[in-house]
Image (cartoon, helix red, strand yellow):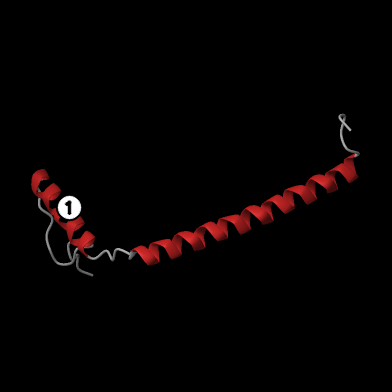
Amino acid sequence: MTDTGGPSGGESRPKNPLARAWRFLKQVFDELRKVIVPTRRELVNYTVVVLVFVLIVIGIVSLLDWGLDNLSDLVFGGGAGA
């Protein structure tokens, strides 16, 4: 199997540190051009979905905490403060 020069394809790696840094920055900007920025409406929709999901998870965890607390009170007798 032949070495193709790494993940960038058939290009060889520059040995000069400045050339390597410049190439890295060029690749970063090339990738940033591919990013699709969501519209304001999409951003609001995503935010609402995330907040609703977080509230649902908070509710589930709170119910589990309350239920396990009551179960431990039944099993272990409520502790010294009861």
Q: Is residue 59 left or right of residue 24?
A: right
Pointer 1 local density, CA inside 10 Å: few below 14, some 14–19, many at least 20: few
Residue 75, x across and y down, in percent: 89, 45
Which residue occupies the foreground of this view, 31 or 46? 46
Query: Label 1 is placed on what type of residue?
Result: Phe
User: In this figure, which residue is indicated by the disc labeled 1?
Assistant: 24
Q: Residue at x 79, y 45 (%)?
A: 69
**In which quadrant will I find the C terminus?**
top right
Would you say residue 6 is visible in this rendering? no
Q: Residue at x 18, y 57 (%)?
A: 29
Would you say residue 81 is visible in this rendering? yes
Helix, strand or loop status at disc 1: helix
Q: Is residue 45 left or right of residue 15?
A: right
Q: Residue at x 49, y 61 (%)?
A: 48
Residue 39, x across and y down, in percent: 33, 65
Q: Is residue 50 left or right of residue 31?
A: right
Residue 63, x across and y down, in percent: 73, 53
30 vs 73: above or below = below
78 vs 38: above or below = above
Residue 23, x across and y down, in percent: 13, 54
* Count of marks placed on residues: 1
57 vs 82: above or below = below
**In which quadrant will I find the N terminus?**
bottom left
39 vs 63: above or below = below
Residue at the far bottom: name it.
1
